[in-house]
Image: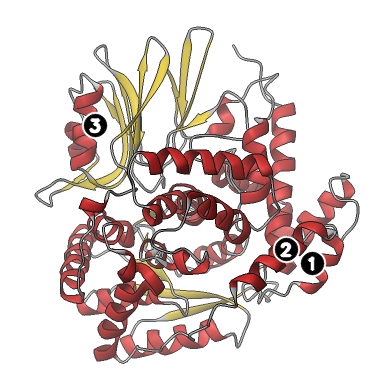
Amino acid sequence: MRINLIGNNWLSGDGLHVRGYGFDPEGNLLREDTLLRYFSGIASSEDFCQRLKRLNGLYAVIVESDAFQGCSIDRTRIYPLYYRCGNGEMWVSDDATSLSFKGDTLNGKAVSAYQVAGAPFEGQTLVKGIQAVKPGCLVAFEENVPHEVPYYRFEKYSEEIHSSNSKELDDVVLSVFERMVRSLDGRQVVVPLSGGYDSRLIVTMLKRLNYQHVLCYTIGRPGNGEYEVARQVARQLGYPLVFVDNTDSRVANVEMLQTEDFLRYARFLGNLVNFVWLYEYPAINYLQRNGFLEKDAVFVPGHSGDCIAGSHLRKNYIDADSSMAWLSKSIMDFSFEYGYDKWVEDSILKEFEALSEAGYLPYTIFQSFIIRNRQTHQIINSARIYEYFGYEVRLPLWDNGLVDLFLSLPFDQLRDCSLYNDYVCSLFEPYKVDIRKKDVSLPPLWKVRLKAYVKRLLPKRIIHRFIHIDDIVCEQELSTTLLNELVEKGVYASFDDFTSVNEIIKDWYLMKVKEWLQSAPINS
């Protein structure tokens, strides 16, 4: 097995490569040498699987002993791994692009999913022959043949569902943050603070546990509503808040996106799977250059409490007993913003029907798909920017205890995020940060479906003139240089050949992948 690792803080020894951290069932922190010892002596997929099930954290591990060869990642995919087989050899890397060779071609089915969803489906990359380890999965290599073994499933049976309440949720949240605080060793905690509940939960719990060494920052345009809420929250909790003004040319400018460093960032974050968010790149650069960040700072973003708490069920008009046809159609209409592909919808439906036949509850099948594809690929993956700039990241809202609690809730406690919203608002109240989000009612389903249908028919140059998105983080200005390149190289016919800024970034990244394939080295 040939291994190529470029990420930070890999530790190797005794046929093992590990990175990240985890807590064992007794709550002991395992990292570096102790994490290496935890995975030592693995002799089978069954042994590997049991150790993964007992570990709670963010990690990646590769085993290359005489007895067993394989690799795995945690449920979040924050530390992705990739592999390919060929000519009697096996390659494993955390850098998918390094696994591409002269003559490689795009994976047509993965590109189809990418074009409508913004990322291929789990396990795939944009390049044929290069596979990604799925979240919550291990891959065992037997005679250079990969075998996937899930050690965690996000779908649930009816007998696994049970109600909870704010007291039980608070017990879990408190244990999650107490465990995290103990492991931080007093280091600077940096929180991207928005106007939403997730990041506010992070800072409120840090205050509750009397953690003092905290820096908050908010990115955007001056005077936007998100910043006003963040400012009130930070002031009330007594934490410093840095406002990063992306309209200031000293912070963000299009020239930054024309540098070799930005291309390295795009390659690092994209990894032949994801298009890359733009707005945090200049912001973290600014915070680092101006001395706001300590060398051993730990970023703690609020990804993605509202998702596991059920927010996408509402957005997609999902009921407790929705049909598999409706689940797949709702994903195409309401979760995928870049177009429509019949093959993609059919492949989702086929997967959902198999899961339904296995007895899983419909709404948990939907939740699982959103988590395994959208959340891990696009939302959680965006937090890898902190690693790019040399910092550690924690995701307390993806702690195993919280994920297990929310994914086991009955539908009525996930509808409208009812348990989560009631809990966080009661938590915020004593700290006087219970600023309510606006209760935006959903439009009638017929109206939303009609809009989605019409959007498929109209040319993009017409659609984007009528779509208005409140771009408070200034990605429209930042994407100008990417749009120019797409037009100059003939990918876009004109400067209005797109429907959204995200589509510009998506298409630009796919263009770059094609260019990287053309310059890939010969396999030696």
Quarter where residue 162 is shown = bottom left
Mark 1 to mark 2 CA distance (whole Å): 6 Å
- Classify residue 305 by image quadrant: bottom left
Quadrant hosting residue 98: top right
Give how far across and how far down residue 389 sits, in percent: 49, 53
Q: Is residue 479 above or below residue 73?
A: below
Task: Say whether residue 127 is left or right of residue 137.
Answer: right
In the image, 203 versus 13, the foreground residue is 203
Counting from the top left corner in percent of width and height, residue 141 is at: 37, 18
Looking at the image, which residue is at 30% across and 80% down?
422
Disc 2 residue type (three-letter): Ser
Q: Residue at x 55, y 86 (%)?
A: 225
Q: Quadrant of the N terminus?
A: top left
Give the residue displayed 29% in from the left and 61% down from the top.
Answer: 406
| Residue corresponding to mark 2 | 500
- Give yes or no for contact between labels 1 and 2 (Cβ–Cβ under 8 Å): yes
Q: Kindly state the secondary structure of the residue where label 1 is placed.
A: helix
Kindly tell me whether residue 479 is visible in this rendering: no
Q: Is residue 150 above or below residue 158?
A: above
Q: CA distance from mark 2 to mark 3?
A: 42 Å
| Above or below, comparing residue 94 to residue 392 in the picture | above
Q: Amino acid at mark 3?
A: Cys
Q: Earlier in the sequence, mark 3 or mark 1?
A: 3
Residue under label 1, please give it: 464
Mark yes or no: residue 188 visible.
yes
The amino acid on which the numbered mark 1 sits, given as a three-letter code, is His
Q: Which residue is mark 3?
A: 49
Q: Are marks 2 and 3 in contact (CB under 8 Å)?
A: no
Do the residues under discs 3 and 1 have CB atoms within 8 angstroms? no
Depth order, front residue of 284/268:
268
Nearest to the observer: residue 450 or residue 468: 450
